[in-house]
Image (tube, coloured by chain):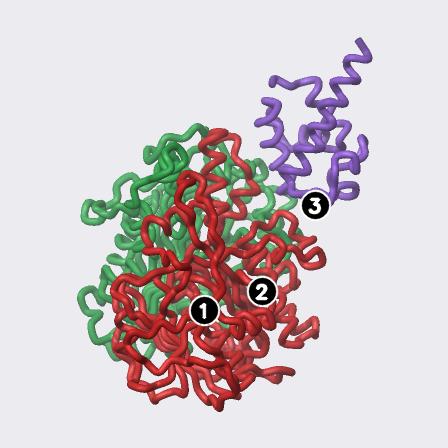
């Protein structure tokens, strides 16, 4: 069971990395270059407010997920890891 | 050289002309609802013009109808209707929607079938806003459309000021116009800055903007030309400041240095001090970022007690029209001697050092400012003046 | 009017940089690309496109990763104009005025945004695409890359967008709003616009725009690109020429005879016969649209060619020399003494604009 969960988390993580690279036009980066616990904003990937709203749409389109408000976004979007776990726990698609 | 405002005209959800608009302001009526213009899957109220006067309804381009309605009022006010021949009259207007080839039906047909009727394309190619208005009123001076996003209307007035000072022409019809459209409504919605309730500029609990539509037009002349026509104008365009944040495509600089610079430049241009300013018609969109930054800068430059309002509580954010509408409202307020309450504001936000007016407020003084901030980091500040003060 | 052109940047089908443009003008006409339109596969379409490699520049574009082709073209041309001028002082660059002229704006991004509405619904559209579909996105990026906080404006007036930009540049310099102004144009091709061109224009099947046919039914080959000029009244390290006048109107403008006319005949207007009527008999004439393609804001490209000719005292041979009316066209690339050039644009509704340039 645990193994299955880890496998699914890994799949989601990879897909998220690919989607982020594509949607946010992250240049010269491959999915394997992004650490699993990479911080998204500030340091790490250095994303900004426009990227944040793009990720909201990305989650809606690909996983059927809504982000309620900025407070939730701040927690969910902290790192690749928090994003992955949120998708795993709540995905509709 | 003094540039005078000899005519003003306006149309928005607040009214189809200035008297109706002032009546709406007096009674704090907020005419917002879901749009009737197009189907849309979003729960946002908008400020739609319910009844474009029949005379202007024939146009296939709604923005042009709105513009011509306001232009007619402004030209009447300036006593220039049917009197343009022989004069060098220019037209400079700001817009956003009307400059884009974004007809969804056209594109949908093209995607599905590989071809589409060229009607929308032909309308677009004949529809440069300033050119179309110039053609409709018989103005044969220079004309140009400014596409600076949300400060287009203000910047069109700024361009007109530059033209007049350079002697490019004698009289200019300037301002902005924009229609409600599904495309920007979807776009602003995706940015997470549109409210599903009535907007509350500068309010502690503000949730975002409401879109609106309309047109705001001023007739600008050099003072000698106006006097030669027998006009004794009260209002004049005293100054203009324009800067760029050079920071981000959609967010204002968090310290507001660009807006501060634009404000200061406009004061210098008008040769006045902050103490001379009796009120500010702020950009005040009701987004978290704009109002916080703008409020902070207004306090910093003009003092925390400066009288401030946002008229977007009555009109919504009319994008390319906003600067034009708000220039007209600022001019009218100076002339009439009062500003309306800043509709939508209830509770002060501790992060914002200014407090908008909460009731109809008399104003005393000769000078007022209208500010506009735009996507792309544009900051515009217009100083409008009245030779008579109601003190 | 007296404005010095102190620097030029250009991005077009044959590359980037004023030297590339000089090379292209010397080389003459080369065939356009043949592409397939997405929904009309059996009808190849001719176009002068910008190659992908031209729009890659890690050092300049790394700060603006989301920028679309439209913005990238403008940023590179504007950046190059500043670099070409030799202006390096931070205070001068940070107070630059920027005026961008565009006829059609970033339409490819607009259509991509419409794709989102149609494919994903009103709720699931990309905010990044929306933010880039506004006409002033390119200007915003230019300001950002240069860290320039001066006045910035984007104007649109179809064929006369660039002329309006020059008029405003002079006004800003008169008023002292800025010491230098970056003035330029940007317009792009794209699949939908190419389809529209295939419907509305007569395309030159041999790929040759013929400016001197003065045809009532002229032929076009769409192009795209951006040109920016660093305009100043101040001291500058380099000076291409002076712009001494921009005239617009419906009347036939009586002018002194220049040494050369450059006409913006490019197949985009319904009737080019007016160009013939404009020319003083036997005056030397050129037209360079066959080098960069049919672009609504193509006047800026011809203006750049004129600036090069005045600076280098060379006349470039017309790239396509079909000449049924026997006008005195520039047939050879060679040294020439040129003091004044007039660049002329006629539109289909009798409007005309003239840019006068003089040797410094």
- Residue B30 is drawn in which quadrant? top left
Q: Residue at x 38, y 84 (%)?
A: C284
Which shade is chain C? Answer: red
User: Which percent across, then down, holds residue B317?
Assistant: 44, 45
Q: Are marks 2 and 1 in contact (CB under 8 Å)?
A: no
| Quarter that holds the C terminus of chain B | bottom left
Query: Where C37 sits versus C226, above or below?
Result: above
Mark on residue C304?
Answer: none
In the picture of the structure, the residue carrying the numbered disc 2 is: C77
N-term-proximal mark, 2 vs 1:
2
User: Which percent across, then down, holds residue A71?
Assistant: 67, 31
Query: Where C221 sits versus C92, above or below?
Result: above
Q: Residues within 10 Å of mark 1 (few under 14, many from 20)?
A: many
What is the CA distance from the residue labelled 2 to the residue labelled 1? 16 Å
The purple one among the chains is A
In the picture of the structure, the residue carrying the numbered disc 3 is: A27
Q: Residue at x 48, y 82 (%)?
A: C315
């Amino acid at each position: 069971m645990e193994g299955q969960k880890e496998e699914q988390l890994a799949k989601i993580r990879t897909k998220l990395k690919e989607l982020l690279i594509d949607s946010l036009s992250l240049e010269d980066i491959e999915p394997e270059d992004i650490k699993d616990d990479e911080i998204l904003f500030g340091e790490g990937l250095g994303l900004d407010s426009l990227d944040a709203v793009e990720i909201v749409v990305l989650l809606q389109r690909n996983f059927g997920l809504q982000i309620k408000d900025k407070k939730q976004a701040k927690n969910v979007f902290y790192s690749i890891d928090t994003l992955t776990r949120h998708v795993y726990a709540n995905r509709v698609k | 050289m003094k540039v005078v405002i000899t005519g003003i005209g306006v149309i928005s959800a607040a009214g189809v002309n200035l008297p109706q608009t002032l009546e709406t302001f007096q009674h704090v009526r907020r005419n917002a609802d879901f749009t009737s213009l197009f189907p849309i899957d979003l729960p946002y109220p908008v400020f739609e013009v319910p009844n474009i006067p029949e005379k202007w309804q024939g146009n296939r381009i709604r923005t042009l109808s709105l513009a011509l309605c306001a232009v007619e009022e402004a030209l009447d006010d300036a006593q220039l209707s049917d009197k343009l021949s022989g004069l060098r009259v220019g037209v400079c207007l700001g817009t956003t929607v009307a400059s884009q080839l974004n007809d969804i039906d056209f594109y949908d047909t093209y995607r599905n079938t590989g071809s589409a009727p060229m009607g929308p394309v032909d309308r677009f190619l004949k529809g440069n806003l300033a050119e179309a208005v110039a053609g409709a009123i018989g103005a044969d001076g220079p004309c140009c459309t400014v596409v600076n996003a949300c400060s287009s209307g203000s910047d069109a007035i700024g361009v007109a000021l530059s033209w007049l000072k350079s002697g490019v022409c004698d009289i200019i019809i300037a301002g902005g116009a924009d229609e409600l459209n599904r495309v920007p409504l979807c776009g602003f919605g995706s940015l997470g800055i549109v409210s599903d309730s009535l907007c509350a500029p500068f309010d502690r609990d503000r949730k975002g903007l409401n879109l609106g539509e309309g047109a705001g037009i001023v007739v600008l002349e050099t003072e000698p030309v106006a006097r030669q026509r027998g006009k004794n104008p009260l209002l004049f365009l005293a100054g203009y400041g324009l800067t760029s944040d050079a920071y981000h495509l959609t967010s204002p600089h968090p310290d507001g240095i660009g807006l501060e610079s634009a404000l200061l430049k406009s004061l210098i241009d008008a040769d006045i001090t902050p103490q001379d300013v009796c009120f500010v018609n702020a950009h005040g969109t009701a987004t978290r970022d704009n109002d916080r930054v703008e409020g902070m800068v207004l306090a910093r430059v003009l003092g925390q007690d400066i009288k401030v309002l946002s008229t977007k509580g009555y009109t919504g954010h009319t994008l390319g029209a906003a600067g034009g509408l708000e220039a007209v409202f600022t001019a009218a307020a100076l002339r009439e001697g009062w500003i309306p309450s800043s509709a939508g504001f209830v509770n002060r936000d501790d992060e914002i050092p200014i407090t908008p007016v909460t009731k109809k407020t008399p104003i005393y003084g000769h000078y007022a400012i209208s500010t506009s901030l735009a996507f792309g980091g544009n900051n515009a500040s217009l100083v409008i003046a009245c030779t008579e003060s109601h003190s | 009017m007296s404005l010095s052109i102190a620097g030029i940047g250009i991005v077009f089908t044959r590359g980037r940089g004023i030297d590339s443009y000089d090379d292209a003008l010397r080389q003459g006409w080369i065939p356009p690309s043949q592409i397939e339109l997405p929904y009309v596969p059996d009808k190849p379409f001719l176009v002068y496109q910008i190659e992908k490699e031209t729009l890659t520049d890690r050092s300049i574009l790394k700060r603006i990763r989301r920028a679309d082709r439209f913005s990238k073209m403008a940023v590179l041309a504007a950046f190059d104009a500043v670099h070409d001028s030799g202006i390096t002082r931070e205070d001068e660059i940070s107070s630059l005025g920027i005026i961008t002229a565009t006829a059609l704006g970033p339409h490819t991004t607009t259509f991509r945004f419409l794709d989102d509405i149609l494919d994903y619904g009103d709720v699931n559209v990309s905010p990044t695409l929306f933010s880039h579909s506004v006409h002033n996105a390119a200007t915003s990026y230019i300001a950002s890359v240069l860290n320039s906080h001066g006045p910035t404006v984007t104007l649109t007036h179809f064929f006369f967008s660039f002329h309006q930009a020059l008029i405003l540049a002079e006004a800003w310099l008169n008023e002292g709003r800025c010491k230098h102004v970056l003035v330029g144009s940007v317009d792009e091709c794209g699949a939908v616009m190419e389809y529209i061109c295939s419907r509305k224009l007569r395309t030159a099947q041999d790929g040759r725009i013929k400016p001197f046919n003065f045809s009532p039914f002229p032929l076009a080959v769409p192009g795209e690109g951006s040109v920016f000029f660093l305009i100043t009244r101040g001291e500058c390290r380099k000076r291409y020429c002076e712009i001494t006048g921009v005239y617009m109107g419906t009347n036939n403008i009586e002018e002194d005879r220049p040494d050369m006319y450059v006409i913006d005949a490019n197949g985009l207007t319904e009737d080019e016969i007016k160009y013939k009527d404009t020319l003083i008999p036997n005056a030397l004439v050129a037209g360079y649209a066959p080098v960069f393609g049919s672009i609504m804001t193509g006047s800026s490209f011809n203006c750049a060619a004129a600036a090069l000719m005045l600076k280098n005292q060379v006349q470039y041979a017309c790239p396509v020399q079909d000449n049924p009316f026997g006008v005195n066209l520039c047939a050879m690339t060679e040294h020439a003494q040129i003091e004044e050039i007039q660049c002329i644009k006629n539109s289909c509704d009798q409007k005309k604009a003239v840019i006068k340039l003089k040797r410094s």
